[in-house]
Image: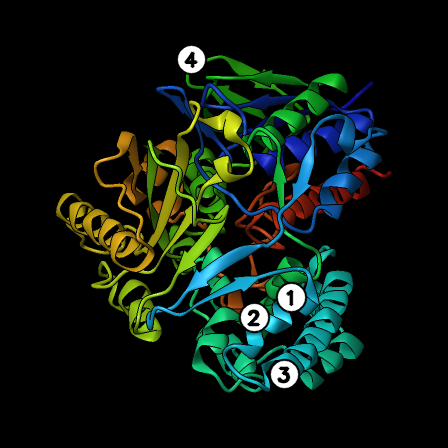
Amino acid sequence: MKKSVAIIGGGIGGLCTAARLLKNGYEVTIYEKEDKVGGRAHRIEKDGYIFDTGPTLLMMTDVLYDTFAYCGKNFDDYITLLQLEPNYRVAFGDKSTITVSSNLPKFQAELAKFDPKAPEQFLRFFSDIAEMYRISRADFIDKNFNYITDFLNLRSGTQLLRKRGLSKLYPFVSRYFTDERLRQLFSFQSMYLGVSPYEAPAIYSIVSYMETGLGIWYPKGGMYSLSLALQKLVKDLGGKIELTSPVKQVCIENKRAVGVELETGKIQKTDIVIANADLIYAYKNLIPASARKKMPDTRLDNYKQASSALLFYWGVDDECKDMLHHNVYLCKDFKANLEEILTQKVLPKNPSFYTYIPTKTDPSLAPKGKQVFYVLVPVPNLESNVNWEKGIARIRKQVLARLKSEFNLDIANKITTETIFTPEDFAQKFNLSNGSAFGLSHHFFQSGAFRPLNFSKEIADMYFVGASTYPGGGIPMVTLSAKLVTERILSDNGH
């Protein structure tokens, strides 16, 4: 008989896991509390505009092609990917700007405007991070762990030490570049993971390689098209997806997961349970306290949550002619900004922010001549004591003022529709601990084998997938987490 699987949550990780298990002959049902799949990769449709709500950068697309190929399908039959060129523009606090490109000669010409030595510095940096990507992908990212000792690969560890991959990110980048703005340019990416480049391991410099070496991609129809493609894949393989079906708890018998109880009271018996919910939330709220005696809440509370994000979704009646698809705005005091968010846990006085305007590539997402304008501002998570109402109004005003003064983009009176998403919304809508938009922090002792395992040592047949287990956050890593948990389940069941 086929083994049955219940997956709690239909995020990217849950969908990819479902597809892989279906291909291996399991019966799979996803229980999703929202009316759409995708988790944080969600969508808002409002006043003729289509807004992606979460991830907006798509890199390392090979993991998605691999998922579909594993299932006997062609990814290109489900979605159309467009490579963005250039990748994005960065505006620094001194009003200088740089355009980042995967066309290396063009990018080197941009770097030379900041420092004549920068093109040569970049080639050394690019070569080293490309090697780190290959090492970490094979031996640290695309690998299951049972014990910390599994993580200690002497050969690969020695190679990473030689490349200084275990040092801190910002000092690592500073060894290559002398211009302060370029040091920021190649280290701010750790903010995608909700961690400071002064704290993140240098191994996360591979994100720069993923951007420039592998390219940044856009799924036609918006990032939510990826969620829809995975939903179709699951259904094509015979899987079931139950929307608006929140799970109340995992059913445990004799230290074994035997099914799920829905909020409606319905109990669905299964052989295996996989939580695609935030891992800390799942342990605290979905697993009965009597079943987690060996993992007390104090241990769970020791995990450090990443920062969060304040998001503005604007429909704008303006051409936004000088803007790119992706734009990054760094404030004058980069380090102080990070200290405020991550250490002091206060709203930044002078915020950095990022804008995503997919209508520059795909006008179909807005009424004719108008733009989808997504703004993300890094902010503290809910461990802070922030007056969000007052803070949101101030930050909104600051973002609009900088766009007007530095980029001649006066849109304050051209916003035709607006939705605001705060850390409180991340906590309520997606059950993310402390409203952290990025889940668990990615500092060294919460990376690789130091992240929570993708299975429960206390409860048999209980597994986890998503950003808070390894290899970590972001669409590529979550997609890989689905591959890894599938491999573990197959191994545990004698395949």
The type of residue carrying mark 3 is: Gln
Please name which of the two marks, 3 or 4, marks the residue nearer to the observer: 3
The type of residue carrying mark 1 is: Lys
The disc label shown at residue 106, or none: 1
| Crowd band around label 2 with a 10 angstrom C-alpha radius: few (<14), some (14–19), many (20+) | some
Q: Secondary structure at mark 4?
A: loop
Sequence-wise, the earlier of marks 3 and 1 is 1
In the rendered image, which residue does mark 2 sit on? 110
Note whether 100 is above or below 377 in the view shown. below
Distance from Cα at disc 3 to Cα at disc 4: 60 Å
For residue 398, side relative to residue 377 (left or right): left
Please name which of the two marks, 4 or 2, marks the residue nearer to the observer: 2
Q: Secondary structure at mark 2?
A: helix
The type of residue carrying mark 2 is: Glu
Sequence-wise, the earlier of marks 2 and 3 is 2
In the rendered image, which residue does mark 3 sit on? 121
